[in-house]
Image (cartoon, helix red, strand yellow):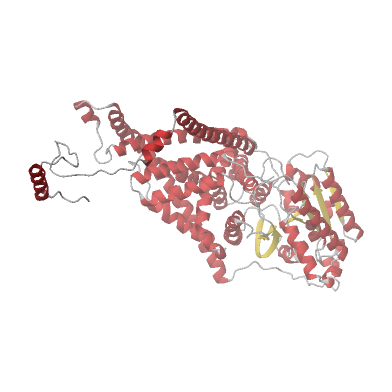
């Protein structure tokens, strides 16, 4: 801050100069003669600027331009590479169901384009302040407005009078379906609590002793054990071993290995394993079909057509990745004794890899509720439930009476269960008996499995609807089959989940005249998630990911339901889900660590089998390491829905809708994570 000029000193100085007549020592400007100023400046910058020649400046600007051009070229090439990679992976990932997926994807893509356009329109209106005083068509006719304001005024009129009313009607319908399904879920949970509170369990008429040698072999019925498999390199050995060591008289059981493998190397391995157990005195047969038709149903149908099957009373079925305990038959067959009307005894699944990753944890929540609540309640109160396709024992007479295995759907287990129920047979579910198996660890295989599980029931519903109406069962059982078993749990559930949370909720952000209550978005789904997670209380920390992931899977389930109902795309294609070998790995480690020699001698399993098992495990590990590098894939429907939900969340942020904004934001990120294949293991 400069000092103020001293006027008195300046006047004294001027008088002294005029009196002495001396010359001015310091020249002063006539315009500013009131005070003396001394200007000191640094010539450094100016000299530096003057030292730069025109050529140097041109080189500097050329260098900067080159840097900018290189940056633009790098970003452009990177963007093009990402787009090409994404397109290649999307095409690869969606090659399984091209026709049905393309239809749904086109609809979702149009919805995304419309959402982005509406968001841009709403952003323009927001920054112009139209959310405080929106223009109307009357004001537009009374005064001259700009084009944007005129279009926005007409858009408000169209959405309020023509779009919002039908959307509100759709919301009301979905809410009613949502509440009905929620009531059904609550009733199931209450039924499970009642069973636990009263200690209700099915009773067996006979209890087989653990010591087979001291009992008469005639007391044990003839049992056929079947293992259908197809290219099961990772799990074949231990699944065969687990079935062959059943604590049951060897002359009262026969093991059928139903191999549909088209890999000659796998066929050779399975044949060698069968020969090994034949040499140990186990009655085991290897069957391979030359013409593989009907998938698993055709395989089982072919096996049941053998002449020697008539000598057996029961058949136990195990998928290739299932490992029953040695006392499995002793814990299941007794329930048929004294109950001639019982066709099926189903046991519970137990998972060796439920804590492997987030995907397996979420699957465990779903399947724990299915077995602990749905199967147990339906089995106890109405003696009917859907056969799970494995870890169950059938009465062969019941299979023959209801028509045997049919190849008309991809859910042959549900098909045979419905037909047996219509013939008057009863089912028993044993929750205390568990059979070890493994969960799918990659999203790609899980998505294929869910597509089959939700398209197959719709195929079956179309085929057996008239049979249900013409059957001789009571009208109560008919109503349970049609409205609860098929419509509510197989059709309505995926329909309202996808429509309500993936379509209607984003639409209400752009059509605020149609409102979706907060309790539908947050509170009731949260309560249902708590009920679903009760059978697996250790999974409570994953309740929010479970809720979001179930909504994300609704797009796959909805697509599968529609394709199965209307026979679209490859709804009848069976894709074998790839196993990781976790169940075999756990069993091998247990066999080595326990080294229970008495059990090995009792079940005719020698130490050499453990060593060969370890050798096979080492081969599998080397194959995994030397195989193709695993990579994540991209799923275009999930990615498109992710951008739709995130776009709607930005629109809800403009309207200050708290719960809707957070739900859309988290759900959008969940779709993004799943669409980028960042959940579970990647595939090769």
Q: Is residue 539 above or below residue 113?
A: below
Residue 46 in picture, x, y percent from top left: 36, 37
Residue 208 in picture, x, y percent from top left: 77, 70
Task: Please state which of residues 561 and 309 is positioned toward the viewer in this rendering.
Answer: 561
From the viewer's perspective, tell me whether residue 45 is left or right of residue 311. left
Is residue 312 at all visible to an observer of this figure? no
Residue 358 in picture, x, y percent from top left: 59, 56
Task: Please state which of residues 463 and 266 is positioned toward the viewer in this rendering.
Answer: 266
Is residue 217 at all visible to an observer of this figure? yes
> Can you tell which quarter of the image residue 123 is in?
top left
Q: Quadrant of the C terminus?
A: top right
From the viewer's perspective, tell me whether residue 301 is left or right of residue 217. left
> Can you tell which quarter of the image residue 508 is in?
top left
Q: Residue at left 53%, top 41%?
A: 639
Q: Is residue 450 above or below residue 52?
A: below
Q: How many dots with numbers?
A: 0
Task: Please state which of residues 130 and 464 is positioned toward the viewer in this rendering.
Answer: 130
Residue 624 in picture, x, y percent from top left: 75, 50
Q: Is residue 94 above or below residue 613?
A: above
Q: Residue at left 69%, top 47%?
A: 577
Q: Residue at left 83%, top 63%?
A: 610
- Extreme residue toward the right, this view: 279
Q: Residue at left 44%, top 52%?
A: 179
């Amino acid at each position: 801050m400069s000092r103020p000029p001293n006027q008195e000193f300046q006047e004294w100085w001027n008088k002294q100069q005029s009196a002495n007549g001396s010359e001015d020592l310091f020249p002063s400007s006539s315009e500013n003669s009131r005070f003396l100023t001394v200007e000191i400046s640094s010539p450094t910058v100016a000299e530096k600027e003057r030292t730069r020649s025109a050529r140097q400046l041109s080189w500097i600007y050329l260098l900067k331009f080159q840097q900018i051009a290189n940056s633009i070229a790098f970003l452009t090439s990177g963007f093009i590479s990402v787009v090409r990679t994404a397109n290649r992976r999307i095409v690869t990932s969606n090659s399984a169901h091209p026709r049905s997926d393309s239809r749904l994807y086109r609809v979702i893509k149009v919805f995304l384009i419309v959402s982005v356009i509406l968001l841009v329109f709403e952003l323009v209106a927001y920054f112009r302040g139209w959310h405080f005083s929106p223009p109307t068509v009357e004001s537009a006719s009374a005064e001259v407005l700009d084009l944007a304001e005129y279009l926005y005024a007409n858009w408000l009129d169209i959405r309020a009078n023509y779009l919002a009313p039908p959307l509100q009607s759709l919301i009301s319908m979905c809410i009613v379906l949502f509440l009905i399904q929620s009531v059904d879920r609550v009733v199931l949970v209450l039924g499970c609590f009642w069973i636990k509170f009263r200690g209700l369990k099915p009773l067996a008429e006979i209890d087989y002793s653990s010591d087979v040698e001291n009992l008469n072999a005639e007391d044990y019925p003839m049992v056929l054990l079947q293992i259908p498999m197809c290219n099961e390199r990772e799990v074949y050995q231990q699944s065969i071993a687990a079935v062959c060591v059943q604590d049951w008289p060897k002359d009262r059981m026969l093991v059928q290995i139903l191999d549909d493998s088209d890999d000659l190397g796998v066929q050779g391995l399975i044949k060698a394993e069968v020969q090994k157990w034949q040499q140990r005195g186990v009655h085991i047969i290897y069957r391979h079909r030359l013409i593989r038709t009907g998938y698993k149903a055709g395989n089982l149908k072919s096996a049941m057509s053998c002449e020697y099957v008539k000598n057996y009373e029961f058949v136990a079925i195990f998928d290739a990745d299932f490992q029953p305990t040695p006392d499995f038959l002793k814990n299941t067959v007794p329930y048929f004794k004294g109950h001639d009307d019982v066709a099926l005894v189903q046991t519970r699944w137990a998972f060796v890899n439920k804590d492997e990753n987030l995907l397996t944890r979420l699957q465990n929540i779903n399947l724990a509720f299915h077995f602990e609540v749905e199967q147990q309640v339906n089995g106890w109160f109405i003696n009917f439930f859907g056969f799970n396709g494995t870890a169950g024992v059938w009465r062969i007479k019941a299979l023959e009476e209801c028509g045997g295995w049919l190849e008309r759907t991809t859910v042959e287990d549900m098909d045979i269960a419905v037909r047996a129920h219509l013939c008057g047979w009863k089912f028993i579910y044993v929750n205390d008996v568990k059979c070890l198996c493994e969960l799918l660890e990659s999203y790609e295989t899980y998505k294929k499995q869910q597509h089959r599980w939700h398209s197959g029931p719709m195929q079956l519903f179309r085929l057996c609807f008239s049979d249900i109406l013409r059957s001789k069962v009571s009208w109560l059982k008919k109503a349970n089959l049609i409205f609860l078993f098929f419509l509510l749990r197989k059709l309505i559930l995926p329909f309202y989940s996808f429509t309500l949370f993936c379509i209607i909720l984003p639409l209400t952000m752009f059509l605020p005249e149609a409102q979706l209550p907060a309790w539908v978005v947050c509170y009731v789904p949260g309560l249902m998630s708590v009920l679903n997670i009760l059978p697996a209380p250790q999974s409570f920390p994953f309740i929010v990911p479970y809720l979001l992931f179930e909504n994300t899977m609704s797009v796959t389930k909805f697509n599968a339901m529609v394709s199965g109902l209307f026979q679209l795309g490859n709804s009848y294609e069976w894709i074998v889900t790839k196993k990781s070998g976790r169940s075999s790995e756990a069993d091998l480690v247990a066999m080595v660590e326990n080294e229970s020699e008495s059990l090995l001698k009792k079940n005719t399993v020698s130490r050499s089998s453990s060593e060969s098992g370890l050798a096979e495990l080492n081969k599998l590990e080397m194959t995994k390491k030397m195989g193709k590098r695993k990579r994540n894939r991209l799923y275009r429907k999930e990615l498109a829905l992710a951008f739709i939900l995130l776009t709607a969340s930005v629109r809800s942020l403009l309207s200050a809708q708290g719960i809707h904004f957070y739900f859309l934001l988290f759900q959008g990120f969940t779709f993004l994570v799943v669409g980028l294949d960042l959940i579970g293991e990647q595939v090769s």
